[in-house]
Each structure stands twice: as structure tokens, then as C-alpha cells.
Image (spheres, rainbow, N blue to C red):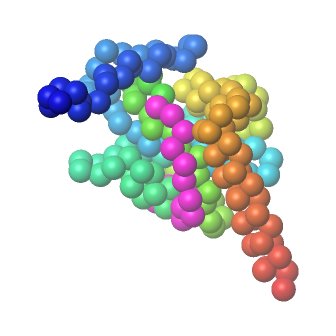
Amino acid sequence: MSGQDLAPPLLAPRRAAPGERRPAATSHLAHRATAIIELADGVLVTAAAGQRLGLPGGKANRGELRSQALIRELREQIGLRVHNMLYLFDHLTPHTSHKVYLVIAQGVPRPQGETERIGVLASPDGEPETTPETRAILRRYARLRGEEGPKSEAVRAMLNLARYIARVGVEERAE
């Protein structure tokens, strides 16, 4: 048996999702970690002064993983501590490469640092002041939630965990 026989088969690149733009190379793009934080009445969105509403998160510092950047940015921007997170997908735009995570966070979100406003978005198309990237990411997330398969099952399990944590927290505060 030669060394070539042991080499793993080459994998074909993932096809772009409908409406997803896939640049040939991403080295020139800003690398951002983006959080979807589901609350009882919608998804948490934030905005800096003079900016449109978008999903919380931010750019990774040099040598920092995007998952680490997301934990740091959520703490700095809105005062939340990440309890758990699940990588969902990459979302590419002409200027930014997003790594999108479903996040369970603890704490009460409050504007801090560069964040001026916090809101809740009930529908991807429900708020005209939302960035196009946010709407596109939330549409992809909604499709993922409705699909069948291991990733969709993991999303539903995370959402069940989030509801459980919220319920336990309410019960503990009531005691």
C-alpha cells in the first residue's frame, strides 16, 4: 500500500446557498463574529451611534479566534456573558466574512462602549432600520431552523436549553 492510498479523498467545496455571494478569496475581507441571541419576543439587535440596527458581535483582533472575539465583544458592547454558543454558518458579503453563532447569554443587555441602542427584532423583514446583512443572516437562520438534519436539531436543542435556563433563572429570582 502506497502513501497515496492513505490520503483522504478531496472534498468538493460547499455550494453557495441561494442569495449567498461567495468571493474567490476572503483575505481582503473584514473577519467578524456575529451573534444570534434569541429572546422571548425576537432576536437581539444593537446599533452604534448613527448606525442601523444589526446583530451584535465584532471583528477579531490579531491572533484572536472569532469565537473569542464574540465572547469579548458581547461583554464589551452589551454586558452579556456567553453561557453557550453554537457555530451556525459562514456568511460572506462584499466587505465582510461573518462567522455566525447561536448564543445563549446571561445578564441583562445594556448599551455599553460604542453601542448606543438595543432592540428586539421579531422578523428579519420587520424593521426597516435593520442592515441588509442582518436581514440576510436572519433569513438563512430561519431556513436552517426549519430544515431537517443534524445542524437544525442542534439549533433546536440550543433553543430548548436557552428556554430552560431562562425559566430556571426566573424561578430562582422568585424564591
- Indicate left or right for 59 with 130 as reference: left
Percent coordinates x, y for residue 49 in the rendering: 52, 43
Choose between 60 and 149: the one closer to the eye: 149
Choose between 11 and 83: the one closer to the eye: 11
Name the residue at 70% across, 59% down.
161
Q: In the picture shown, does residue 145 fall above or below 139?
A: below
Choose between 30 and 9: the one closer to the eye: 9
Name the residue at 72% across, 39% down.
121
What kind of secondary structure does the magenta stretch mostly adopt? strand
Q: Residue reaching furthest bottom?
A: 175
Quadrant position of the C terminus in the picture: bottom right
Was residue 88 drawn as part of the magenta stretch in this picture? yes
- Indicate left or right for 97 with 54 as reference: left
Name the residue at 59% across, 46% down.
102
Percent coordinates x, y for residue 36 in the rendering: 60, 44
Percent coordinates x, y for residue 97 in the rendering: 40, 30
- Indicate left or right for 172 with 144 as reference: right
Was residue 25 drawn as part of the magenta stretch in this picture? no
Tell me if residue 119 can be seen.
no
Residues shaded magenta: 76-90
Name the residue at 54% across, 18% down.
17
Percent coordinates x, y for residue 24 in the rendering: 31, 15
- Indicate left or right for 43 with 100 as reference: right
Choose between 84 and 117: the one closer to the eye: 84
Residue 135 picture quarter: top right
